[in-house]
Amino acid sequence: MLHTSPAQNQRYKSLTSAIWVLLIAAILATAVLTQRSLSRLADSREVITHSLLVNKALNDVMNLMLDAETGQRGFLLSGRAPYLQPYYTALAQMRQARTALRSALSEDPSALAPLDVLDKAIAVKLQDLDRAVSLKSEGHSSEAVESILTDSSNQTMNAVRAAVRGLGADQVRRTNQLQAEIEQEIRSYYLILGVSILANLLLLVGLVQRFRKAAIQRDAAQQEADTRNVELSRLLAAAATRNAQVQGLSELSRFLQSCADLKEAAGLLKQHLPPLMRAASGALYLAAAEQDSLCQSFTWGDKTFVEFFEPGECWAGRLRQPFRQPFETGTASCAHLQSAYASAHNNNNIQCLPLLAYGELLGIVVLEADVASDPQEGLEMEGSRRFALEQVGLSIGNLKLRESLRQAAIRDVLTGLYNRRFFDESSQRELVRALREQAKGGYAGLALMMIDIDHFKRFNDQHGHEVGDQVLREVAQVLQSHTRGNDVAARYGGEEFTIVLADISDQLALERAQRVRQEVEQLVLHPSGKDVGTITISIGLSQFPTHGNTVDALLLAADKALYEAKSAGRNQVVVAG
């Protein structure tokens, strides 16, 4: 039996206490570094959200300018006062849009000078628009038309576009710079975090060795030393597992923030989620975008699960909290597990865990895990699973928010078609591609349709704006159904739409336009039981390269053909002459 002197025992206790102090400090440092890393990830999400808000404000300003110019040109070409409605509506909303843009850029001093340039360019363009409208209203039609055909009119609008692009480019540069700085800080935190974890492990190993040595030296404290060794081993494993989970979650969150869509995010989760859940079998269900159901994204292990189910069929979806299945199936168990798959599972081990973000149910994770032999280990495992799902839910929620903001920037809210800004960019790309393919030979051609709803003001005046909006949506659905992969259907402004048809011959384009017109004429609307009458459209069709080699030339040709169709009695297709 080994004995130690009181002085040796005192030195041993002092050294052990010092190691414990260092271990606690290292654990606290690890927690602080983890919190800072997650905080900087949140800052990265805020930078992206702010950038998207600025881009939306720029889009609103540009769309309002284009709406004002469209209304002015419609009035100058037709001489009819109703075409001024979008013009005055755009002028009324311009102040709010510019105020929103300035508010979004208020925290960036470098954006004040470009913002002033944009304000001056808008003021000059609005003066040009107002001067042409005044000339037309006073009876000087030829002078008004000449004023919009001059280079000065194009230069003022180009000045507005240049100012908007400059602000957008500055915002992208600033966002990229902030992202780079944040990523550099996060990498530094990861490095320090790794050192801290290593220190934790070394200190824990040191404590284990000292307790083992003390057990050999002190026979009287053998049982106590063994107990401490077991406890410290458990703490060591728990700390290592926790640290690995935190590091893995940080990496996963960073990658999820960079995913382009939910499909790519699901691919990452298929690789990283099963180890975090620590279950032999499981399945991830994500909420479908266009239907109220949960669809299976992926599974792991040797068990089978249903392909999809309604949120109300799972108690975790109803209660918005984890739910462990009872031992026997019945009314207290989830309906999606009371199927042909139920016999393949041991229900006592199945858990349904909700995936939540901002109060919204994003999905459900179904796990079949072994029952933990130690209650404390089971509680720790449950806590780690919930923590992991909270972080994954926040990342997916932010990804869906970013996607919705991106769609809001390029989609028209009322009709769901692309907006005017997206049409301008995509039509230019398609025309460049058409020129390139034409040079190679074998390219069928490109067509552009300008579409206007006949007597649209009648629907608003006789039945109200809700019916008018329904007419716009129904017509938009018809247009969308006649577009292919590279085709673009967009709301041009007011009741006007446009479609760019890529790689299509002149005859097929004319046949497509006739089918669109016929399907719109066959629409039947009975809002609140009332018959709103027949809906018809007039279409002007221009074709590349017959009617021009630029988007502006094709638009002008299609616009003239549209007015010819309306002058000839409406509800018809006219090909540009």
Image (cartoon, helix red, strand yellow):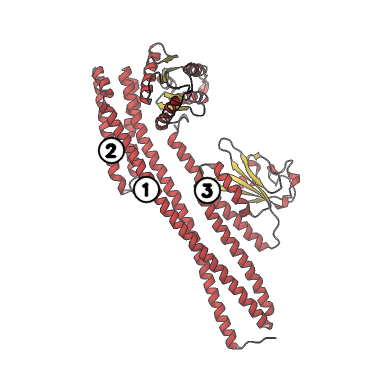
Dot 3: element = helix
Vertical side of 69 occupied by 16: above or below: below
- Looking at the rendered image, the disc whose residue lies closer to the viewer, 1 or 2, is 1
User: Dots 1 and 2: beta carbons under 8 Å?
Assistant: no
- Quickly name the residue at label 2: 119
User: Dots 1 and 3: beta carbons under 8 Å?
Assistant: no
Query: Which circle marks residue 529 in the picture?
Result: none
- Quickly name the residue at label 3: 256
Residue 157 x %, y %: 30, 31
Which residue type carries mark 2?
Asp
- Quickly name the residue at label 1: 174
Q: Quadrant of residue 166?
A: top left
Dot 1: element = helix
Which is more N-terminal, label 3 or label 2? 2
Q: CA distance from mark 2 to mark 3?
A: 38 Å
Which residue type carries mark 3?
Leu
Residue 152 x %, y %: 25, 28
Nearest to the observer: residue 258 or residue 407: 258
- Residue furthest to the right in view is 343
Nearest to the observer: residue 552 or residue 279: 552
Which residue type carries mark 1?
Arg
- Looking at the rendered image, the disc whose residue lies closer to the viewer, 2 or 3, is 3
Task: Report the number of numbered marks.
Answer: 3
Which is more N-terminal, label 2 or label 1? 2
User: Dots 2 and 3: beta carbons under 8 Å?
Assistant: no
